[in-house]
Amino acid sequence: MQKSFLSIANLSKDELLELLEVASTQRLRVVSKMLRDQHLALYFEKPSLRTKASFETGIGELGGSFSYFSAVDTGKLGERESVEDLAKTMSEYFSAIIVRVYSHTALEKFTAAASVPVVNALSDREHPCQVLADLLTIRDKLGKLEGFKLAFLGDGNNVALSLALAAEILGFEFILAGPKDYYLKYGQIKQTEDIDAALQNADVVYTDTWTSMGDEEEEMRRKKLFLPFQLNTETLRKAKEGAIVMHCLPAHREKEITNKVIDSKQSVVFQQAANRLPAQKALLIKLFSKATV
Ligand code: CP
Ligand code: NVA
């Protein structure tokens, strides 16, 4: 496994499958000393509940410790000191750095300068930790990680890209339905404005906020353009019967998803949230396995 984890594409298919195997043994309250004597940093430029909580709980359950920094402590990347100086300094204190940032390019600079592993806890480009938990949830629910169709409704954002890359690695079908202006700008991903076509035969229907952190200035424009791609009872009916409904949360109820759908039996959004913990414990075990085993 590579030293750092910035993209889901940093994992080969075998590494990803192995990580998910380890994850299924690491549910809540499974404790060990795999990270004994390791002190990690969480450096978050943006707000977080699930990612912060699951990393902090996970590090504790693995016998490690952590320090948390928000932009209030250290400034945004490159604001108080250069990205490289921050990365080099933090590397002197911590055995890994978990980072949530606005700019993926800044994250790459940070990682290049750091001498310890860096984990992408969300950037404007990807949210790979989320997708580890999503894959675990899909496997829990569908019993497989290939041979199914995932339709993503809405914005071609960080979560959508990590899912699309996971689909390439594992061989499931990914399609995004949304307004053309907000398609993913990456490779040969299937994308359409025809929501019916995207939903046809879908086993998994996924949506996320129309306005990600950092895109707030465009909120009004987005609201109008994305409304036809709302996940509601009528749109869900176009997917395969019993399709599972996914959302990384936080959800904007009655915007990208209706209450009826997110609270329905088909919704697995809280299983996704719960799976953040075992997925990230498995990631940390894998990142540290050379040093600790
Ligand atoms: N899904 C997710 O990453 O949630 P937070 O922003 O609360 O961490
Ligand atoms: N796409 C969202 C995900 C939040 C977990 C964002 O970047 O704000």
Image (spheres, grey):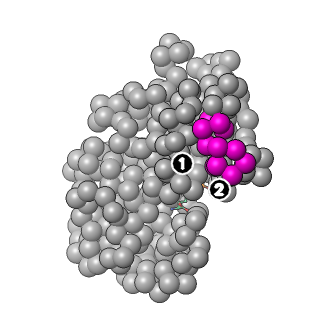
The mark lying in front, picked from 1 and 2, is: 1
Q: Specify start and end residues of the magenta stretch as a single range.
A: 77-87
What x and y, as percent, mark residue 76? 67, 52
Classify residue 36 as left or right of residue 176: right
Where 47 falls versus 231 (above or below)? above
- How many numbered tags mark residues here? 2
What x and y, as percent, mark residue 26? 52, 32
Classify residue 150 as left or right of residue 105: left
Q: Which mark is residue 106?
A: 1
Q: Residue at x 35, y 42 (%)?
A: 9
- Tell me which label, 1 or 2, sits earlier in the chain: 2
Q: Residue at x 49, y 50 (%)?
A: 105
Which residue carries the number 2 mark?
46
Classify residue 76 as left or right of residue 145: right
Q: Residue at x 55, y 84 (%)?
A: 220
What x and y, as percent, mark residue 18? 36, 30
What amino acid type is highlighted by mark number 2? Lys
Q: What secondary structure is found at the residue carrying circle 2?
A: loop
Question: Can residue 126 be seen?
Answer: yes
Task: Confirm whether the magenta stretch covers residue 235.
Answer: no
What x and y, as percent, mark residue 180? 32, 76
Q: Mark 2: give few (<14), some (14-19) or many (20+) Cα within 10 Å.
A: some
CA gap, disc 1 and disc 2: 14 Å
| Residue in front for this viewpoint, 54 or 31 | 54
Where 159 falls versus 51 (above or below)? below
Q: What secondary structure is found at the residue carrying circle 1?
A: helix
Q: Quadrant of residue 53?
A: top right
Q: Mark 1: give few (<14), some (14-19) or many (20+) Cα within 10 Å.
A: some
| Disc 2 C-beta below 8 A from ligand 2 | yes
Task: Confirm whether the magenta stretch covers residue 84.
Answer: yes
